[in-house]
Image (cartoon, grey):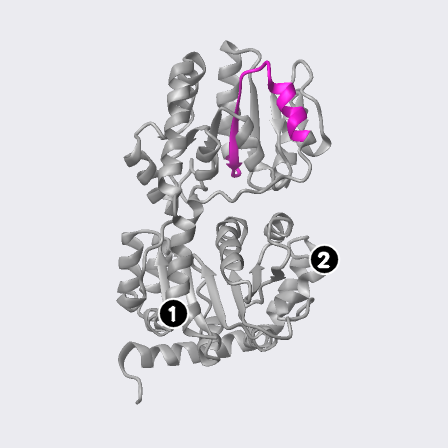
Amino acid sequence: MAMTGPMAKGEIVYKIYRALTYGLSPLLHLHLHWRKLRGLEHPIRWRERLGRPSLRRPSSGPLLWFHAVSLGEGMAAIPVIKFCSQRRPDVHILMTTTTVSAFEVLKDRLPANVIYQFAPIDTPAAMDAFLGYWKPNWIVIMESELWPNLIIGASKCGIGLALLNARLSAKSFRHWSRPVLFPLMSLLLPKFSLIAPLSSVQAIHFQLLQAPPFSIKFSGDLKYVVDEYEQKDTRHIEYLQKQLSQKQFWMAASIHRGEEEIILGVHNVLVQTHPDIVTIIVPRHPQHGQEIAEELQKGGQNVALRSQHKELIPGTSIYLVDTLGELRQLYKLTPIAVIGGSFFPGLAGHNISEAAAAGCAVLTGHHVGHFSHMVREMQQYNSLSVIQVSGKLELEKVLMELFADAKILESRQKAAKEAFHALSSAVVSNAWDVLNFHLLRNKC
């Protein structure tokens, strides 16, 4: 039967997209080379981005492919991957991400039996080569990686598709709702056997973009789940803990460019009333931490850089973390965590669940993007669990209060931890249940 309406238009739009990505392939290959030279692609494994494997596919048995764009989505996928591995030991699992930072952290946290590759770019040649080599039986995409060549290619091969922690930012929703792109989304979303949205608002957005209602099932937000991971070498963390044991300190995590000015401004105010205070700053990107340290040192300020294992000598009140993969351990040290990426318009926040799970008093700005539902749910469970501040002055006021009154600090810490545990329970098993029912049991 011939397709009509939006789906027929979607086929036309997809053919145009496929032709464009085919025609632009040489330029995209050059772009990958340029990214490799800048250190943005893996120096050895970058060819995986062209669909060229570096590992062998197991010769027999079904294969489940999990794809996450970067570190946050990859961390959310790991508990489900472990659960799947336990429940279905007969299934081989392939994990892909696109960023080097995700690779550096996740490669040591995935189970030993999981195959890890960089994801192919969405050109016909790269995607067809990837699907042809790995021959997955099912694909689980995390959050919002809606690449047309991937989805249509998988559908044509009879590969089952699921979208976990499904979300669209307000900007993406407007983008996909445009007359030119709406037909393409109307073609793509019905290819999914399962769409597990983050919230009821997200579910409505997907249905407005023509996702079949029967494919939408709720399982909870996987970013609430904090996977238990044993750090291989904790000596440096333990040593830092000893250095901080007699000091007051707080941490600003996942700081984006420009936000360090707010954090340092607050620090300068706190030092006036708490001379021994230490501010730990964890920029989103390690290079940014080194740049902050250089600027502060030019101004004559003592700074300890984590990558250099510098000690907190007398007179040093700024500790800059320019390393990857240690944030969870640092949350366990600090009594107060300010989550960045949230103080300026255009930013979209970061996951607050790890700080809450560690028992920190949790603060964040108001520009939290798709994490707004997490903030709202935690505050609804307990209004003390997350404090939102609008900028430097409010942050100063709240931190002054927390450092001045141990009972207030303790109540904030307890509220955050209790809200996390209440909202995170059974999320992984729920995700497994919907995956197994709607995807894995239907194809072999």
Q: Residue at x 39, y 31 (%)?
A: 416
Instruction: Give left or right: position of 227 versus 315.
Output: left
**Residue 252, position in %: x, y?**
51, 30
Element type at marker 2?
Answer: loop
Taking the magenta stretch, the answer to whether it contains residue 256 is yes
Which residue is the site of mark 2? 43
Taking the magenta stretch, the answer to whether it contains residue 45 is no
Q: Residue at x 65, y 25 (%)?
A: 240
Query: Which residue lies most toward the bottom here?
Result: 1
Q: Residue at x 44, y 80 (%)?
A: 15
Q: Quadrant of residue 168?
A: bottom left
**Residue 81, position in %: x, y?**
52, 56
**Residue 48, position in %: x, y?**
65, 66
Is the N terminus in the top left, top right, bottom left or bottom right quadrant?
bottom left
Q: Is residue 389 visible?
A: no
Element type at marker 1?
Answer: loop
Which residue is the site of mark 1? 192
